[in-house]
Image (spheres, rainbow, N blue to C red):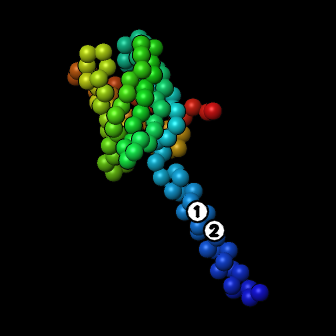
Amino acid sequence: MNTKLIKVLLTCCCLICCMTVFAQNATPLRGVWSFSLPDAPDGYQKGTIEFKQVEDKLTATAKMTYGTYTIREIKKDDQKYTCSLYVDGGNATITFEPKTTNLITGIVKVDGWEMPITLTPVKE
């Protein structure tokens, strides 16, 4: 077989593999993440968030000491994500940005408070 043809075929195979891996990791918000919200009241300082793709929307479920909360839609604007949820009488707005595949940082705003939040993936 021609050496040039083999090189072209190998290059094409590598490109296809790379595109497949990139497509699978296009949305870093997948699976279960542990969050830390140290400035929040007791019971809300830590928990987990499970990100899911439902139909064409990115959604999530947040679990804390005092309950489970549904985030119906997470919107992406450039590299930042925003969402809101109703937590025990108050509306919380969360803005966050993936820093790496192992770290997401952001801000949670509730009734005039701004609190930093950090998420790390849960190892299964």
Numbered badge on residue 18: 1
Q: Position of residue 75 (x, y in %)?
A: 32, 43
Q: Estimate how packed mark 2 is, as few (under 14), some (14 to 19) or many (20 or more) residues with alpha carbons within 10 Å.
A: few
Q: Estimate how packed mark 1 is, as few (under 14), some (14 to 19) or many (20 or more) residues with alpha carbons within 10 Å.
A: few
Left or right, 80 with reference to 91: right
Q: Farthest residue in the front direction?
A: 55
Numbered badge on residue 63: none
Distance from disc 2 to disc 1, alpha carbons, whole Å, reads: 6 Å
Q: Position of residue 76 (x, y in %)?
A: 34, 46
Q: Which residue position holds label 2? A: 14
Q: Is residue 32 visible?
A: yes
Amino acid carrying label 2: it is Cys
Tell me: residue 14, above or below residue 100.
Answer: below
| The N terminus sits in image quarter | bottom right
Left or right, 89 with reference to 116: left
Amino acid carrying label 1: it is Cys
Q: Residue at x 51, y 32 (%)?
A: 33
| The C terminus sits in image quarter | top right
Q: Position of residue 41 (x, y in %)?
A: 37, 13
Left or right, 29 with reference to 116: right
Query: Which of the two residues, 55 or 21, is positioned nearer the viewer here?
Result: 55
Q: Residue at x 56, y 60 (%)?
A: 20
Q: Quadrant of residue 5?
A: bottom right
Q: Position of residue 46 (x, y in %)?
A: 46, 20
Q: Quadrant of residue 107?
A: top left
Q: Residue at x 59, y 68 (%)?
A: 15
Q: Farthest residue in the bottom direction?
A: 2
Say whether marks 2 and 1 touch (CB < 8 Å). Answer: yes
Query: Which of the two residues, 36 or 75, is positioned nearer the viewer here?
Result: 75
For the residue labelled by badge 1, is the local secondary structure a helix, a strand or a loop?
A: helix
